[in-house]
Amino acid sequence: MAKRALLMAEADDVATVIEAVCAGDTVAVETKQGEAVEELISSHDIPRFHKIALRNMAAHDIVHKYGQVIGEATAPIKRGDYVHIHNIESIKTGVER
């Protein structure tokens, strides 16, 4: 059975996993209304309530969650990767690139 992740806003680059995920698990991404968005395979173990990448991102790409900028990728991130402080860093609020 697929693990669940929540997409906070349509334009987000990441989703929040609802339960802990192991590398190789299938993750079913849903909207807040419970509508299925997509499925992907996790590349890493991801703790509960942490982020999974929904798309490939290059270093210095801007990362969005809640429809807002949450940081900048510090390294390439692949779809299904764990997204956290090891591969993104905060930037000033309101910065658009």
Image (tube, rainbow, N blue to C red):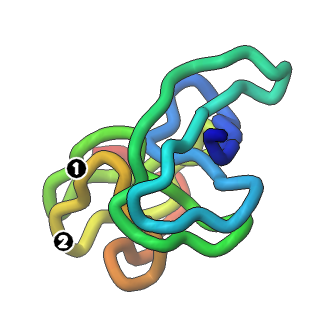
Residue at the (50%, 23%) spot, across then down = 38
Viewer-proximal residue among 94 and 55: 55
The numbered mark at residue 57 is 1
Image quarter (top left, top right, bottom left or bottom right) of the N terminus: top right
**Helix, strand or loop status at disc 1:** loop
Q: Which residue is mark 2?
A: 75
Q: Residue 26 location in percent, x, y? A: 50, 44
**Helix, strand or loop status at disc 2:** loop
Q: What amino acid type should be assigned to the residue bearing mark 1?
A: Met
Residue at the (30%, 46%) spot, across then down = 79
Extreme residue toward the bottom, this view = 86
10 Å neighbourhood of mark 2: few (<14), some, or many (≥20)?
some
Q: Residue 64 location in percent, x, y? A: 48, 46
Q: What amino acid type should be assigned to the residue bearing mark 2?
A: Ala
Viewer-proximal residue among 56 and 4: 4
Image quarter (top left, top right, bottom left or bottom right) of the C terminus: top left
Please state if 73 lies on the left or on the right of 23 as rendered.
left
* Picture quadrant where residue 58 is located: bottom left
**36, above or below 27, in the image:** above
Residue at the (74%, 60%) spot, across then down = 19
**92, above or below 97, in the image:** below
* Picture quadrant where residue 96 is located: top left
